[in-house]
């Protein structure tokens, strides 16, 4: 005679029957553990939940796009992040994590990355890159009559003959050229100094119609080691390229600073500045200026 335990085991339902009952229970009408009314309530909840979520997301996107304008930023002036004060940039800067320009005079492998970086930037200024109805020559145009929706061509000839790829931008001779540029700020226009209001450092040096540029050593030792600096073009950034209004093909003006007699074997801390009445200088946030180091091995 079979024991009670054996009888109970034999009477227990098989795994196959339990699975079938879970999929569909004929006694309760439940499918996958839920009745039809339970499934209906669950699906209705998620339908309403995700509909409201999608609607909220659509409203956020719509509000976001109302703040954008492809032609003109909504937030400008001193309330914006850039505070209507353009920063400066420089080339070569092949490594964005470093502001050190270090090379060995007469050794192309040590400075090729620098000259290549400068040349890559200047490729956008070649004549064939500034052709079309959006570009005009502004040399002889009056500012009041000039169509500001058009872009003034920037002529590479204005950069002189010393800082060119044929001369390795001075790196082969140990007289490196550093390209300086003002960052684009929508609608910004330089304000010229009135007579006698400029800083003593640049008094008598400013050319009308230009943003003056200087490069100096941050410390007395740096100033002595860096030697004289020559600029191309010598007058600085022409103001005819301003304001920047998001014109198609816009090229900001550039200036080369060539260090003619830098001392070898020492690191020089250099601070270059752009000068206009409405340009403020600050080392930490690159306001109106740029800092870099120069080392010639």
Image: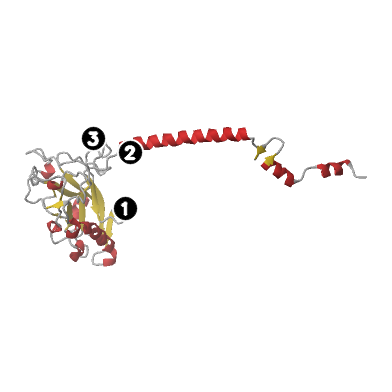
Quarter of the image that includes the C terminus: bottom left
Quarter of the image that includes the N terminus: top right
**Residue for point 54% across, 33% down:** 44
Which mark is nearer the camera, 2 or 3?
2
Q: Considering only vertical position in the picture, is 166 above or below 41?
A: below
Please indicate, yes or no, whether residue 50 appears anywhere in the rendered image. Answer: yes
Please indicate, yes or no, whether residue 266 appears anywhere in the rendered image. Answer: no
**Which residue does the numbered mark 1 point to in the structure image?**
98
Of residues 10 and 219, which is closer to you in this image?
10
Q: Quadrant of residue 168?
A: bottom left
Secondary structure under the numbered disc 1 in the rendered image: loop
Tell me how far mark 3 sits from mark 1, CA to CA. 29 Å
- Whether residue 289 sits left or right of residue 203 in the image: it is right
**Which residue does the numbered mark 3 point to in the structure image?**
78
Please report whichever mark, 3 or 1, sits nearer to the chain's N-terminal start: 3
**Which residue does the numbered mark 2 point to in the structure image?**
65
Of residues 76 and 96, which is closer to you in this image?
76
Tell me how far mark 2 sits from mark 3, CA to CA. 23 Å
Of residues 187 and 159, which is closer to you in this image?
187
Please report whichever mark, 1 or 2, sits nearer to the chain's N-terminal start: 2
Q: How many marks?
A: 3
Where does residue 46 sit, x and y in percent of width and height? 53, 35
């Amino acid at each position: 005679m079979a024991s009670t335990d054996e009888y109970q085991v034999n009477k227990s339902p098989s795994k196959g029957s339990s699975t079938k009952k879970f999929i569909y229970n004929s006694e309760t009408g439940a499918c996958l553990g839920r009745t039809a009314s339970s499934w209906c309530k669950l699906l209705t909840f998620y339908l309403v939940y995700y509909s409201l979520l999608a609607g909220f997301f659509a409203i956020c996107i719509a509000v976001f796009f109302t703040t954008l304008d492809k032609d003109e930023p909504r937030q400008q002036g001193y309330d914006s992040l850039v505070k209507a004060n353009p920063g400066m940039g420089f080339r070569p800067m092949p490594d964005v994590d470093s502001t050190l320009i270090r090379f060995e005079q007469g050794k192309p492998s040590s400075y090729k990355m620098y000259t290549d970086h400068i040349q890559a930037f200047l490729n956008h200024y070649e004549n064939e890159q500034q052709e079309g109805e959006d570009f005009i020559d502004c040399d002889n145009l009056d500012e009041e009559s000039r169509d500001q929706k058009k872009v003034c061509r920037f002529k590479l000839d204005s950069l002189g003959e010393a800082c060119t790829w044929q001369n390795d931008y001075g790196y082969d001779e140990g007289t490196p050229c550093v390209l300086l540029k003002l960052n684009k700020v929508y609608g910004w226009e330089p304000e010229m100094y009135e007579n006698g209001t400029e800083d003593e450092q640049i008094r008598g040096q400013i050319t009308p119609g230009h943003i003056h540029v200087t490069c100096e050593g941050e410390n007395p030792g740096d100033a002595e080691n860096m030697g004289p600096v020559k600029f191309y073009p010598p007058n600085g950034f022409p103001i005819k390229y301003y304001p920047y209004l998001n014109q198609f093909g816009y090229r900001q003006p550039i200036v080369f600073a060539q260090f003619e007699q830098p001392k070898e074997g020492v690191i020089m801390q250099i601070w270059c500045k752009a000068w206009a009445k409405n340009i403020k200088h600050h080392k930490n946030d690159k306001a109106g200026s740029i800092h870099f180091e120069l080392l010639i091995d």
